[in-house]
Image (spheres, coloured by chain):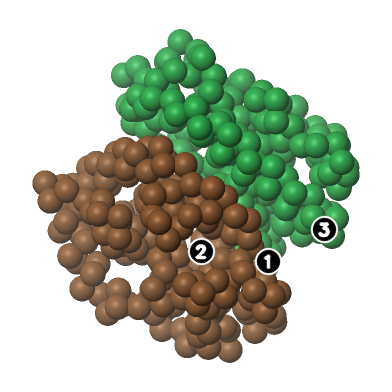
Chain colours: A green, B brown
Amino acid sequence: MITLYDCATAPSPRRARIFLAEKGVKYDCKQVDLRTGEQLGPEFRAINPRCAVPALVTESGDVICENVAIASYIEEIHPEPPLMGSTAIERAQVLEWNWRCEFEGLSAIAEILRNTSPHMKGRAMTGARNVEQVPEFGARGKERLGYFYEDLNERLEKSAFIAGDFYSLADITALVAVDFSAWVKSSPDACLKALAKWHKEVSARPSSKS
Amino acid sequence: MITLYDCATAPSPRRARIFLAEKGVKYDCKQVDLRTGEQLGPEFRAINPRCAVPALVTESGDVICENVAIASYIEEIHPEPPLMGSTAIERAQVLEWNWRCEFEGLSAIAEILRNTSPHMKGRAMTGARNVEQVPEFGARGKERLGYFYEDLNERLEKSAFIAGDFYSLADITALVAVDFSAWVKSSPDACLKALAKWHKEVSARPSSKS
């Protein structure tokens, strides 16, 4: 059985949990306590030297630590239901929109949180190194998150789901981003109606409770 | 024939050019002049509303604009030689390392350049919107780029190429990052011997001239 190193309250491993739930894949789940810095200790460092969750250990013992890579691996060994598209162009569109939801959405929110929260002092970046906060990153993060939401809303005015007319990895990443943004009081403006409608729909899927 | 909207001097489209050269795929190449802001004009905006290169137009007229998505599409329609791995775990490792080379490498260099170059005033982010520079981002970018090089060197002490014992998309992204970093006087330190050896080898491939 595969093993997922997880933290129930963190956004990044939630992406993997929702993906696995949509696939109906069973896995052994191990919690890593980020509040006490367990991810920086020798035991977890031996699993993922980058000291971040999620980390997925395959049945052969290989370790995969980035969400897009975890999704690609699970999609190959459990193809149904497809969550990364069914044709070459669909697969490209899923990767493209997933990239945008990650670079423009999730990373902006992480930038705000890690550079402004008193709990994140000296931990302004994910990973093994301690990096000092730069408060200006909070304002930049909010600016680019606002642009991301505008673009996402425009997309969802024309498309049922983010990558096309099918639910995919890109919707999972965007859902996690929107929910995570509430932590830094940066949820999408209610005037972004298409985004709000989509968020209600994807939140109603049982996997969203993961 | 596919069409690549390109800018001969820019790092992002170079990733697509090298990938296409390794595949031996012929394409129609259209230059977009970033120096005069052609990417912001109505003609190119109709191709890619995000006003960035590369943009690949498929034979069916679909437009793909992110490198990982362009690579995935080309890999499917021209499978040989494989540049994204040959097994489920290899494909995951290519995506994971490509992600790292992009998030931790290329994006750090772009952060330095766009927030410190006098030519980039008001253009601190790629895309349709004007965003003001924050000089502090230059220092943070240099800090995280240094960590990325350390990690890459450590990886290359154990592995012939970045994602494993085969040349892949991850090597292309890292090569473009290392070459691009010279623009901001942030090339890897010469003491990172494994990284230097790898750079010499991948630079010797004919595709690197793309």
Label disc, if present, on residue A159 of the rendered structure: 3
**Secondary structure at numbered mark 1:** loop
The image quarter containing residue B166 is: bottom left
Rendered position, B126 above or below A179: below
Looking at the rendered structure, whether the residues under marks 3 and 1 are on a common chain is answered as no
Residue that mark 1 sits on: B49
**Residues at marks 3 and 2 touching, judged by CB atoms closer than 8 Å:** no
| Residue B67 badge | 2
Asked if A68 appears above or below B210 in the picture, the reply is: above
Out of A37 and A169, give the one closest to the viewer. Answer: A37
Q: Which amino acid lies under the numbered mark 3 shown in the image of this protein?
A: Ser
Residue beneath the point at 29% across and 78% down? B209
Q: Where's residue A207, x and y in %? A: 75, 34
- Location of residue A28 by image quarter: top right
Mark 3 element type? loop
Q: Amino acid at mark 2?
A: Asn
- In depth, the one of A2 and B210 nearer the eye is B210
C-alpha separation, residue under disc 3 versus residue under disc 2: 22 Å
Question: The numbered mark 3 sits on a residue in which chain?
Answer: A
The residue sitting at 51% across, 14% down in the picture is A119
Around disc 2, counting alpha carbons within 10 Å, would you say few (fewer than 14), some (14 to 19), or many (20 or more)? many
Mark 3 nearby-residue class (10 Å; few <14, some 14–19, many ≥20): some
Q: Position of residue A161 (x, y in %)?
A: 79, 52
